[in-house]
C-alpha cells in the first residue's frame, strides 16, 4: 500500500493534470495555431513574464495575474512550505509563492537556485554554488513551486537542499528559457531521459498533453539503475492510461529485479530504432535528451557549456540532424 504522503502526492499531481486539462486558457482556445507564448517571453527578455489569463463566459480575456513572482534577473528568497519524501534518496520540495500566485514559467524553462545564506553553500574558491532545476509543478499552478530533487553524495547543492527544514528559505532566480515548445509543432516527439534528468521532459509532456488541441505523439524512453529509482512513474502511468494514443513510456533498467518485464541494460541503437520515429520524418520529428552527462554524450554528443554542442553519438549514427535533437 502507498503511504499517506505518497498517496497525497499522487492524488495532488493527478488532480493538477485533470485541472490543467479542464481549464480553458486563451493560449489554447483563441485559435488552433500553436501558442507562441514562450517565444514572446524570450523576445521580451522575460522581463514581465506575461500574464496569466483565461476566457470568461463572454469570451473576453480576464487577467488574473500580471507577472510572475519569480525574477529572471535577481535571486529572491522563497519559503519552503513542505517536504514530501519520494523514495530512498529523492524528495519533493514545495516552495510557497506569494499571494497565491502562479509561477508562469514558460515551457520549456528552468530556474537556478543558491543558498539564502551567502556563507552556506560555496565552492572551493569561495564562490556561491548555483544549480539549475526544472520544477514539476505546472506553470499555472497557484501558490506553489515544486522541485523534485535527488540527493547525490557528491552534490553539494542537493545535499544543502535536502538539509533544509520546512520554514527555511532558498534563493531562486528564473525562469531560464530553454526550448520554446509550441503545441503541434511536431508530429512525433521522443523524450529520452535518465535519472533525475526526467524533470524537463516531464514539464514538456504534461504541458502538451493537457492541451485539448494536442495532436503530437510522445514516446518516453526512461532509463534508471533500479526500479526504485524510477521517478514520477505513477504520473507517467496515469498519462499513458489517459492518453493511450498520444503517449507511451518505455522503461530501461541497468539492474532489473526478478520478473522485470521492461527493457534491461542501456538506451541502445536498437532501442531507439524500435521506439523512436525515424529521422526520415525530417521536421516532423523531435528528440529531446536529458540525463547524466555520460548518457547524453553517448546518445547525442557532449553539450558545449550552455550551448548544444556538436551532434554525435547514437542519434547521429541513426541519421538524426542537429535540428531534430535538443539536449537539455
Image: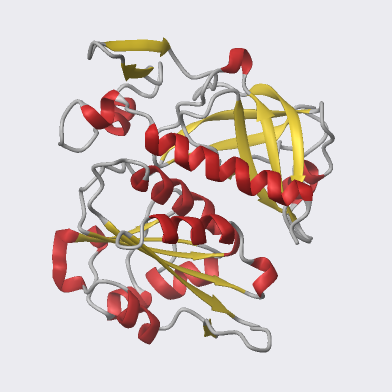
Please say which color scheme the image uses: secondary structure
Residue 131 makes an appearance in the image: no
**Percent x, y of residue 108:** 40, 42
Q: Can you say whether 37 is above or below 98 in the image? A: below
The N terminus sits in image quarter: bottom right
Residue 202 makes an appearance in the image: yes
| Residue drawn 61% across the image and 24% down it | 75
Q: In which quarter of the image is residue 303?
A: bottom left
Depth order, front residue of 123/274: 274
| Residue drawn 35% across the image and 78% down it | 272
The C terminus sits in image quarter: bottom left
User: Number of callouts in the render?
Assistant: 0
| Residue drawn 26% across the image and 32% down it | 28
Tell whether 288 sits left or right of 93. Answer: left
Depth order, front residue of 134/12: 12
Q: Quadrant of residue 274?
A: bottom left
Q: Can you say whether 169 is above or below 250 in the image? A: above
Tell whether 76 sits left or right of 290. Answer: right
**Percent x, y of residue 36:** 24, 32
Depth order, front residue of 43/163: 163
**Percent x, y of residue 7:** 70, 49
**Percent x, y of residue 102:** 51, 23
Q: Can you say whether 276 is above or below 119 in the image? A: below
Tell whether 176 sits left or right of 123. Answer: left
Amino acid at each position: 500500500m502507498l503511504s499517506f504522503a505518497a498517496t497525497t502526492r499522487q492524488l495532488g499531481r493527478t488532480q493538477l493534470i485533470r485541472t490543467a486539462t479542464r481549464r480553458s486558457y486563451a493560449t489554447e482556445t483563441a485559435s488552433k495555431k500553436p501558442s507562441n507564448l514562450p517565444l514572446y517571453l524570450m523576445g521580451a527578455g522575460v522581463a514581465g513574464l506575461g500574464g496569466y489569463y483565461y476566457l470568461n463566459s463572454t469570451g473576453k480575456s480576464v487577467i488574473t495575474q500580471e507577472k510572475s513572482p519569480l525574477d529572471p534577473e535577481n535571486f529572491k528568497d522563497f519559503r519552503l512550505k513542505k517536504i514530501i519524501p519520494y523514495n530512498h534518496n529523492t524528495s519533493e520540495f514545495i516552495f510557497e509563492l506569494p499571494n497565491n500566485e502562479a509561477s508562469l514559467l514558460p515551457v520549456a524553462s528552468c530556474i537556478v537556485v543558491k543558498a539564502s545564506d551567502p556563507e552556506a553553500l560555496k565552492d572551493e574558491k569561495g564562490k556561491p554554488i548555483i544549480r539549475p532545476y526544472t520544477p514539476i509543478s505546472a506553470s499555472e499552478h497557484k501558490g506553489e513551486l515544486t522541485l523534485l530533487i535527488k540527493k547525490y553524495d557528491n552534490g553539494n547543492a542537493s545535499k544543502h537542499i535536502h538539509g533544509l527544514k520546512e520554514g527555511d528559505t532558498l534563493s531562486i532566480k528564473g525562469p531560464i528559457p530553454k526550448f520554446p515548445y509550441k503545441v503541434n509543432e511536431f508530429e512525433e516527439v521522443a523524450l529520452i531521459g535518465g535519472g533525475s534528468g526526467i524533470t524537463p521532459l516531464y514539464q514538456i509532456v504534461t504541458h502538451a498533453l493537457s492541451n485539448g488541441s494536442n495532436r503530437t505523439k510522445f514516446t518516453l524512453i526512461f532509463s534508471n539503475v533500479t526500479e526504485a529509482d524510477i521517478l514520477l512513474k505513477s504520473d507517467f502511468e496515469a498519462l499513458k492510461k489517459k492518453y493511450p494514443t498520444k503517449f507511451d513510456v518505455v522503461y530501461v533498467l541497468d539492474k532489473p529485479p526478478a520478473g522485470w518485464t521492461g527493457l534491461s541494460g542501456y538506451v541502445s541503437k536498437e532501442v531507439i530504432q524500435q521506439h523512436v520515429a525515424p529521422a526520415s520524418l525530417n521536421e516532423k520529428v523531435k528528440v529531446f535528451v536529458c540525463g547524466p552527462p555520460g548518457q547524453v554524450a553517448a546518445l547525442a554528443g557532449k553539450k558545449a557549456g550552455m550551448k548544444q554542442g556538436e551532434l554525435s553519438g547514437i542519434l547521429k549514427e541513426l541519421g538524426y540532424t542537429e535540428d531534430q535533437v535538443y539536449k537539455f
